[in-house]
Amino acid sequence: MRVVIRYFKEKPLYLLLVASLLAIGLDLLGAAPVWILASASLGMIPMAGLIGEATESLAEMAGPRLGGLLNATFGNAAELIIALVAIREGLLELVKASITGSILGNLLVVMGLSMLAGGLKHGVLIFDRKKASSDSILLVLAVITLAVPSLFVQTSNGADEAAVEWLSLGVASLMILIYVLGLVYSLKGRGAGLLRPSAERGPHGSGRWSPRASLGLLIAATLGVVWLSEILVRQVEPVVSGLGVSEFFLGIILIPLIGNVAEHMVAITVAMKNQMDLSVEISVGSSLQIALFVAPVLVFASLALGNPLTLVFNSFELIALVGGVLIAALVASDGEANWLEGVELLVVYFVLALAFFLLPV
C-alpha cells in the first residue's frame, strides 16, 4: 500500500485513472455526452502513460537497440487505437485532423514548452545540432510526402476517387519504407530520431517491473485504451451537434492531447534538467512516428475496416503543417534554444489553433 501511495505522489497524473471508471459509469447511465467525452478523455491520459511506462520498462531490459525498436513501435499506440476506432465509425475527418494536430502539437507545443521551461531555469540550452538537423530534414520530407495527394486533388480538377485512393496507398507504402529504412539506420548506431532512448519515466529507475509484469501492464493498459476509445468516439457526433464545435477541431486539439500528455510531460521535465537533447528527440521523434508510421498504417487499416482513408488534407492544414515544420526546423538549426524561442513556437501554435477553431469545415 505504501508503494502505491508513494507511486501516486510521484506520478499524480495517474490519479486520473479514477476518470476511467467515471467514464464507464457515466456511459452505462446514459449521462450527457459532453461529460462522458470529458471523463473518457481524462481517463485516457494515464492509460496512454501506462502504455509508455510498460514499453519503457521492457525497452530497458531489452537493451538500447531492441528497446529503441519497442519505443518506435509503441510510442504512439494510444493515438493509433483511437484513430482505428474512429475510422471504423466513419469519422475520417477526425482522424486526418488528429494526424495534423499530433505533428503540430509535438513540434510547437512540446518543444515550445520544453524550451520555455528549460530556458527560464538554465538560460541557453544546448543540444546536438547535427542530429536535430538530420531529423528536421526527415520531417520536412515526411510532410512534403503527406502533402502530395492533397496537391494532386487540388491541381487535377475532378480527380478520380480511385486514383486518389491508389495515390494515397502508394504514398503510404513509400512512407513505411522510409520508416523501416530509418529504423535499420538507427539500429546500426548511426543515429536517427526514430529510435528514442529511454526517458526514465518511472520513479524507481530501470528494471522496476519484471518482464511478465511489464507485459501484463502493457496488455491491460492497451485494453483500457480500446475500451475508453469506444466510449469516447461514440460521443463525438452528439458533442459536435450540442456544442457547435467541429469534428475537425476536436481532432486537431483533443485527440493529440490525450494521447501524448504523459510523454509531453517527460519532454518538459528533462528539459528542466538541462537534457535538451532528449527533449528535442522526444518531440521530433514522435512527430516522425506519426507522419511515417501511424498515418500510413491508418491508410491500410482503413481498407480492412471498410472506410478508406485518403491522405487528402484541406489547404489550411497543409499550410499549418509546412509552416510548423519549417519554424521548428529553423529554431533547432543552430543547436541552441532559449525561453524566447519557446514562446515563439507556442504563439505560432495558438494562432493556428484559433484559426482551426474558427475555420468553417
Image: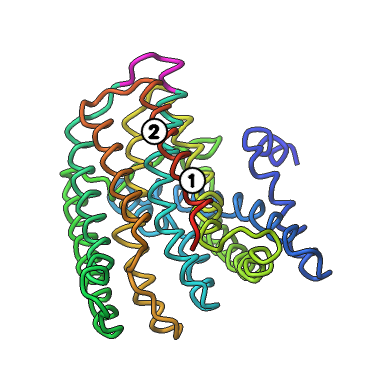
On the picture, is 125 further left or further right than 346?
left
Q: Is 122 contained in the magenta span?
A: yes
Residue at left offset 76%, top offset 68%: 27
Q: Is residue 176 above or below residue 19?
A: below
Left or right relative to 192: residue 75: right
Q: Position of residue 215 (x, y in %)?
A: 51, 60
Identify which residue is drawn at 31% across, 31% down.
Answer: 277
Which quarter of the figure has residue 125? top left
Q: Is the magenta stretch mostly helix, strand or loop?
A: helix
Residue that numbered label 2 is attached to: 345
Q: In which quarter of the image is residue 160?
A: bottom left
- At horizontal 23% and vertical 42% (from top left) the residue drawn is 136
Q: Earlier in the sequence, mark 1 or mark 2?
A: 2
Q: Nearer the viewer, mark 1 or mark 2?
A: 1
Question: Could you give the CA–CA distance between mark 1 and mark 2, rounded to whole angstroms?
Answer: 12 Å
- Please name whichever residue, 345 or 169, is drawn nearer the observer in this view of the structure: 345
How packed is label 2: few (under 14 Cα within 10 Å), some, or many (20 or more)? many
In magenta segment, residue 49: no
Q: Is mark 1 on a helix, strand or loop?
A: helix
The residue lying furthest to the right in this view is 29
Per the image, the residue denoted by label 1 is 353
Range shown magenta = 118-125
The vertical placement of 19 against 280, above or below, is below
Q: Where's residue 247, x and y in %?
A: 55, 63
Q: Which amino acid does label 1 sit on?
A: Ala
Q: Quadrant of residue 193?
A: top left
Asked whether disc 1 touches disc 2, contact meaning CB atoms under 8 Å apart, the reply is: no
Counting other residues with Cα less than 10 Å from the Cα at mark 1, is it few (<14), some (14-19), or many (20 or more)? some
Q: In this view, does 230 lie to the left or right of 253?
A: right
Q: Position of residue 213 (x, y in %)?
A: 56, 56
